[in-house]
Amino acid sequence: MDWGKRLSTSFATGVQATKERLGRVKEDEITELPQEYKDLETRVDALRQAHLTLLKITKVFESEAYDYPSAISENISELSTSLGHGITAFAATNLKGTRIPAPAAPQPAPAPEHKTLPHALVRSARSASATLTAANTTEEPLAGALDVYAAGMDKVAAARVEHDQAVRLNHLHPWQQNLNSAINVAMKARQAVRTSRLELDGAKQTLKSAGPAKQEVARLQVENAEDDLVQKTEVAIALMQKVLSNPEPIKHLNELAKAQLIFYAVAAETLSTTQAELEQLSLAAEENSR
């Protein structure tokens, strides 16, 4: 189709859509699509909405800091430290051989830290233990208890990282891929059906108002539009059926549950051991306080 015909068809389709939207086309003048097609449309819409509903929540797994609000302020602080380190390193390198005193050799940049609640609990427990140890010349029971807690949470934190990686790789990304590819392909096929249907109804309106000299051309346009609509409807039906029969979404949901099961099992086992140790320390502290 040349650009002139394409532009003309697009304009006619737009006019037909506007007329329908404004209620200027009778219902019996709008081509009825097969019931099978309409039923599939409803089911695909529901499938798409189901994907979006779950994705609205699970997309938090794209960032490991989803359970640690303080990550924002820490990121700003780390950015400031990183910039300062970069400037110092640049100056130390580029001021050599000049009369300008070079700053002291920069210390290595701090290693990045995981921004999760378990990791933050580990860091805070260790810091609290170090504070107590530095202020006491004798063994501080709470410091030891904090070390036990930190050791346990360190294992939980490592499991959290593995959990998030598994969720992103085996659930989140495939879930998004299914939404952005298979479902969207079906949605585009439906849009092609709508456009074809508008072209057919526009051609019918043209035939109805065509004079004797243009009747044959207008009739051929209607026939061609009918054939096009049938072909596009069949394609859309096949694509929607394929999307609805796809077993992958259930597989991807299973992967989410599997990752969560592994993490919570590790966390439960680790915390059970940690809590047992802390209970012994608690009983010992109570005994010593008598």
Image (cartoon, rainbow, N blue to C red):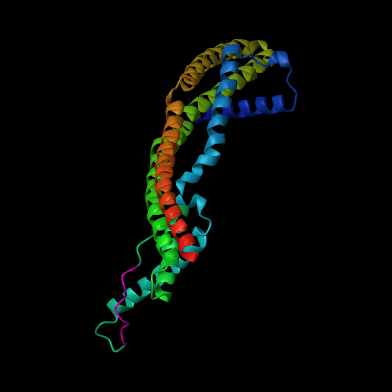
Does residue 47 appear in the picture of this structure?
Answer: yes
Residue 88 in the image, given as x and y percentages of width and height: 35, 76
Asked if residue 227 is positioned above or below residue 118 in the image, the reply reads above
Q: Using the image as rendered, state which of residue 53 and residue 158 is in the foreground.
A: 158
Q: Is residue 173 left or right of residue 201?
A: left
Residue 231 in the image, given as x and y percentages of width and height: 50, 15
Residue 11 in the image, given as x and y percentages of width and height: 61, 29
Q: Is the magenta stretch mostly helix, strand or loop?
A: loop
Which segment is the magenta one? 101-109
Is residue 164 in the magenta section?
Answer: no
Furthest residue to the bottom?
99
Q: Using the image as rendered, state which of residue 153 and residue 213 is in the foreground.
A: 153
Q: Is residue 128 left or right of residue 205?
A: left
- Give the residue at x 55% y 23%: 44
Is residue 104 in the magenta section?
Answer: yes
Q: Using the image as rendered, state which of residue 84 and residue 127 is in the foreground.
A: 127
Q: In this view, does 52 lie to the left or right of 175?
A: right
- Give the residue at x 61% y 14%: 33
What is the count of numbered marks? 0
Within the image, what quadrant is residue 25 found in? top right
Residue 288 in the image, given as x and y percentages of width and height: 46, 64
Within the image, what quadrant is residue 133 found in? bottom left
Does residue 174 appear in the picture of this structure?
Answer: no
Q: Using the image as rendered, state which of residue 176 and residue 100 is in the foreground.
A: 176
Furthest residue to the left?
97
- Give the residue at x 38% y 46%: 159
Furthest residue to the front?
290
Within the image, what quadrant is residue 7 found in? top right
